[in-house]
Image (cartoon, rainbow, N blue to C red):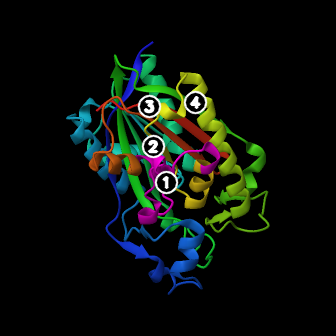
Amino acid sequence: MKQVKIASIGSYVPPKIMTNDDLSKLVDTNDEWITTRTGIKERRISEGENTSDLGAKAAIKALEKASLTPEEIDLIVVATSSPDALSPSTAVYIQSKIGAFNAACFDISAACSGFIYALNVAAQFIKTGQSKKALVVGAEVLSKVTDWTDRNTCVLFGDGAGAAVLMPSEEKGIASIFNGADGRKTEFLTLGCVPVKNPLVKPEKLEDFKISMDGREVFRFASGIILEAIDKVLKDTGYSLDDVKYIVPHQANYRIIEFAAKKLGAANDKFYVNLQNYGNTSAASIPIALDEMVEKGLLQKGDKIILVAFGAGFTWSVALVEWSF
């Protein structure tokens, strides 16, 4: 069975920056309150671009870095919780915008774990020979589903997109990857959708299509599952934590990352963190971080890194990757 590598990475965030001070004009909050509890200082907010717009711009950058044309892509998998529409998929909108008309297209929904879930799905297509060159996109416009009157959630989220090109490889590439979920905890982090409403049913209330979260339960789940996921992928590959150059976590809350580093006995700087600049961009957070790391020259060919995420569902995902470029 073929090996699969990440051949390139790209990202895009809207130009508009919303700082903590800007938020303090909307809700009862301040920079110190937000920074102390989350580590977030600012986030990017769309001024009209939709999820497929962000995803298409990230995809174009990833294709350019891989020296590929859109026509060479035969699969597009998009991870998002904030699609352009329930149907058709955000993936087909991205296909249209970049001209990748030879690609099969679909979305997946795994919340903040979505990018690694999508990596796993696309990798299986390549391993079985169904696909040769796949585009994996994590894209979110969470500002359109954020409750801007709720100071406990509106301070957390931002908009952005990241994309990766996957290709077959003679090298190890994606050395190990796992996805998981615990559906018993669905109520702790939700985003409403269309209720059952028809001539036979009148819903008790209409959903408001906004993110709702129990922060304590999310922290409890995330701080535990990060450790379990990292342990699982290390055991599967036979590597130790010392072999890993960076852990790239979902960028949700600095206190979760700090807790994980302490429990692992790892230095905080082993975890790459950029949430102070972007907030929680859900499925986009890991590819945005990876692209930033490449731009900073932090990743070299052969470096071993762990990608780990958690999200609504509750879902979780982890991958150990040997960097290929």
User: Which one is earlier in the sequence, the residue at label 2 or at label 4?
Assistant: 2
As measured in the structure, the alpha-carbon distance from the residue carrying label 2 to the one carrying label 4 is 24 Å
Location of the N terminus (image quadrant): top left
**Label 1 sits on residue:** 83
Q: What residue type is labelled 3?
A: Val
Q: What residue type is labelled 4?
A: Val
Q: Which amino acid does label 1 sit on?
A: Pro
- Within-10-Å neighbours for mark 4: few <14, some 14–19, many 20+: many
**Label 4 sits on residue:** 233
As measured in the structure, the alpha-carbon distance from the residue carrying label 1 to the one carrying label 4 is 30 Å
As measured in the structure, the alpha-carbon distance from the residue carrying label 3 to the one carrying label 4 is 10 Å
- Asked if 154 appears above or below 311 in the picture, the reply is below
Task: Name the residue: 26% across, 39% down.
Answer: 63
Tag 2 secondary structure:
strand
**Does residue 109 appear anywhere in the picture?**
no
**Is residue 3 shown left or right of residue 203?**
left
User: Which one is earlier in the sequence, the residue at label 2 or at label 1?
Assistant: 2
| Marking on residue 100 | none
Q: What stretch is highlighted in magenta?
A: 262-287
Q: Which amino acid does label 2 sit on?
A: Val
Task: Name the residue: 37% across, 27% down.
Answer: 5
Do the CB atoms of the residues marked 2 and 1 lie less than 8 Å apart? yes
Do the CB atoms of the residues marked 3 and 2 lie less than 8 Å apart? no
> Mark 3, mark 1: which one is toward the viewer?
3
- The x, y position of residue 84, in whole percent, is 46, 56
Tag 4 secondary structure:
helix
